Image: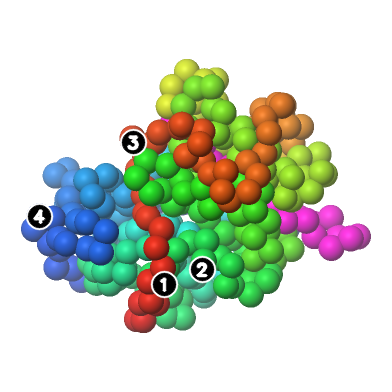
Amino acid sequence: MARRKPRLTRRTPSNTGTPTLPDGPVPITTGTAEVVRDPDHPDRVTLHVNGVPSSSLDLSDPGFLDFEYMQQMAAVVALLPSGPLRALHLGAAGCALARYIEHERPGSRQLGVDVDARLLELVRDWFGLPRAPRLRLRADDAGHALAGVHPESFDVVIRDVFAGDVTPGHLAGTDFAAAARRALRPGGVLLLNCADRPPLTLARRELASLAEAFGPAAAATGRLAAIAEPAVLKGRRYGNVVLAAVRAMPAGDDEHVDLRDPGLGRVLRTLPVPARLVAGEDATRFAGTAAPLGTAAEGTAAEGTAAADRPDMTGAAPRDEVRP
């Protein structure tokens, strides 16, 4: 199975022209959006949604990823067989990861979902995003959009959705994980951005939810993992934990992505901010005795785990699709 090492800080400029960016906050459906340029790198910008850094992009280099958790996700995506991918992004914002996949996997077909219809219209123009069918943008509640996709439609499903400072309850737990598993092709990968603080109760319960939805053998066969900076995993501070789960292949086909891959661990350790991989039986030990988040009604907000420092947020209310 061919694998690619993610290029996270590629510097080859592209001839995309200079976009017209707003000067100051701009009204959007859910509040305001603002694009802030990096004074040291004029082509690098950060999208702030309601004052919170939501996406970071290099306008001349779609292969650039700035946020650490996105670099970690990219390292997992690189394990998938070479060639175009079908990817579903729940929580699109500025589409930084979608731009990266488009750059690294030409010919990919992607769907970005975000609650804010006006934001999607703006970022399409501001950041020169690919057009349909390469990248479709849909204004919708992420759970509603996920429920409406055809089974086995995607190689990758990425959840990066926040309402205020928590992941909406209907986008976490076994119900959500089962819906995401249904949307994945056999061998496909689900990636979750989970913001948590010591003692990582929420991350452990989300991982237990993935184990329940993806089958009792998920951890033992290398289809379950948690990734974060060592200090976060050791419970020393608040941070992002990337959770990954792989849908099993049909019986008799063992060629699924193995998250215990030593190459993945090496890539994560050599990132600009090194991260640690907890996979296989170690993932089982990390989850410990944590109970899965059950129904959508239970919700992550019940955990009392705030995520005010997080770098990505979106809300939850259905909208019409934004057509390119």
Calculate the distance from the C-alpha at mark 1 to the C-alpha at mark 3.
26 Å
What element does badge 1 sit on?
strand
Q: Earlier in the sequence, mark 4 or mark 3?
A: 4
What's the CA distance linking mark 3 and mark 2?
A: 26 Å
Q: Name the residue under label 1.
A: 138
Mark whose residue sits in front, 1 or 4: 1
Residue marked by disc 4: 24
Secondary structure found at label 2: helix
Q: Earlier in the sequence, mark 1 or mark 3?
A: 1
The three-letter code of the residue at mark 4 reads: Gly
Relative vertical location of residue 297 with respect to residue 27 in this rendering, above or below: above
The residue that label 2 is drawn on is: 145
Q: Does the magenta stretch include residue 250?
A: yes
Element under label 4?
Answer: loop
Q: Do the residues labelled 1 and 2 touch (CB within 8 Å)?
A: yes
Do we see residue 193 in this rendering?
yes
Q: How crowded is mark 2: few (under 14 residues within 10 Å), some or many (20 or more)?
A: some
Q: Which amino acid does label 2 sit on?
A: Ala
Q: Considering only order in the chain, which callout, 4 or 2, is on the residue closer to the N terminus?
A: 4
Q: Which of marks 3 and 2 is nearer the N terminus?
A: 2
Q: In which quarter of the image is residue 152?
A: bottom right
| Separation (CA) of disc 4 from disc 3 | 22 Å
Classify mark 1: residues with Cα within 10 Å, few (<14), some (14-19) or many (20+).
Answer: many
Q: What residue type is labelled 1?
A: Arg
